[in-house]
Image (cartoon, grey):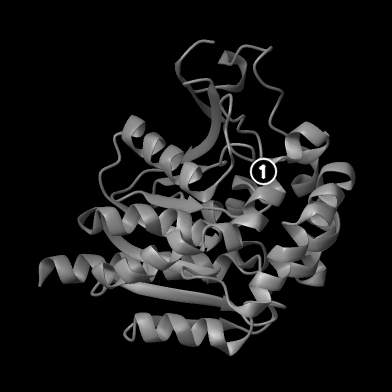
Amino acid sequence: MQSGFFTSQEAVPEAVHPEVADSPFFPRWLLLGGAVLHYVDEGRGTPPVLMVHGNPTWSFLYRGVVSRLRESFRCIVPDLPGYGYSLPPPGYGFSPQEHAAWLRTLLRELGVEQFILVAQDWGGPIGLSLAVEHPEQVKGLVLANTWCWPPFWDARLFSLFMGGPMGRWLNIRHNVFPRFILPLGMSRKRRGSSLQAYVRPFLSPEARQGVPVLAEHLRRSSDWLARLEQRLPRLRGLPIHLVWGVRDPIFGRSAYLDKWMNLFPEAYRDRVLKASHYLPEDAPERMARAVRAVDSASRYEARS
């Protein structure tokens, strides 16, 4: 397989990858180590804004945020390997630690040394694992309906089902998570217009392997999450916005937002009453506003 960057859909060898459906942005590719990583890289601005999705979404989740920011910000939004239109390398295990390693690789290959992190769902611990390693590289955080600690009882129950044998079978055979679980995390008005874009990357059983693995790792990676939580104080002092969909059937519980506020007492809370779990889908304007606010706060602190 060829290696390197490909900056257009046509440049990628046809045998390597299909077209990117649904994305409104120019597709970009990194071919490295047997992986084919699709990512969005739109706009200009310093520092770049890195947006990280979770399970079972892809860069499409942030299209409304990117559209609102690209006139002033460089927006980098990868599809994690095995999600969207990124093909994993041979032997890939789909663990959050592996996803974090590929995210780090992409930033290194793009020459990104500082960034604002925007993260939702598993994008939180995956992105924050990079942030706590090098806090000096992070200019601010925008976190939406995510966590970074061993799972509470409700997430553990979800993991036992969706990451267990029955959940794995339902996902691999019937694509249950994108088709039926994911819509429950969106406001009703968003479901019809966007659902097929989330289902389409998982049309074959082979493409669905990573979805139950991340569900299982809510429990399997508890020790890793505990170590991340212990290192989160390294990020105190950064401008942090928590943009929260209160209709989220799990993360809408006050325990999640309260936990973040205990970790980062000076964080700004934006509770979005009509939004659910996939907040960049439900309220992209609030996410974009949070990025602008974090950037302004970071620049003010740099001048002080």
Q: Residue 279 sits in which quadrant?
A: bottom right
Place of residue 175 in the rendered image (x, y in percent of width and height, measured from the top left): 84, 47
Locate residue 292: give its quadrant: bottom left
Q: Position of residue 20 (x, y in %)?
A: 68, 31
How many marks do you count on the picture? Answer: 1
Identify which amino acid the numbered label 1 is placed on. Gly
| Residue plotted at (15% across, 65% down) | 302
Check the picture and name the quadrant holding the N terminus: top right
| Left or right of 166, for residue 45 | left
| Up/down of 65 relative to 150, above or below | above
Taking depth in this image into account, of 223 and 61 the one nearest to the observer is: 223
Looking at the image, residue 146 lies above or below residue 86: below
Please indicate, yes or no, whether residue 145 appears anywhere in the rendered image. yes
Instruction: Determine the residue located farthest toward the right in the rendered image.
Output: 174
Position of residue 251 relative to residue 160, above or below, is below
Residue 11 placement (x, y as % from top left): 56, 14
What residue sits right under mark 1 in the picture?
210
Residue at left offset 71%, top offset 23%: 18
Q: Nearer the viewer, residue 281 or 117?
A: 117
In-image side of 303 versus 161 (left or right): left
**Where is the C terminus found, in terms of image quarters?**
bottom left
Q: Secondary structure at mark 1?
A: helix
259 up-or-down from 281: above or below: below
Q: Residues within 10 Å of mark 1 (few under 14, many from 20)?
A: many
Q: Is residue 28 left or right of residue 129?
A: right
Q: Dividing the picture into quarters, in which one does residue 182 lie?
A: bottom right
Q: Position of residue 19 (x, y in %)?
A: 71, 25
Could one spot residue 186 in this view of the protein?
no
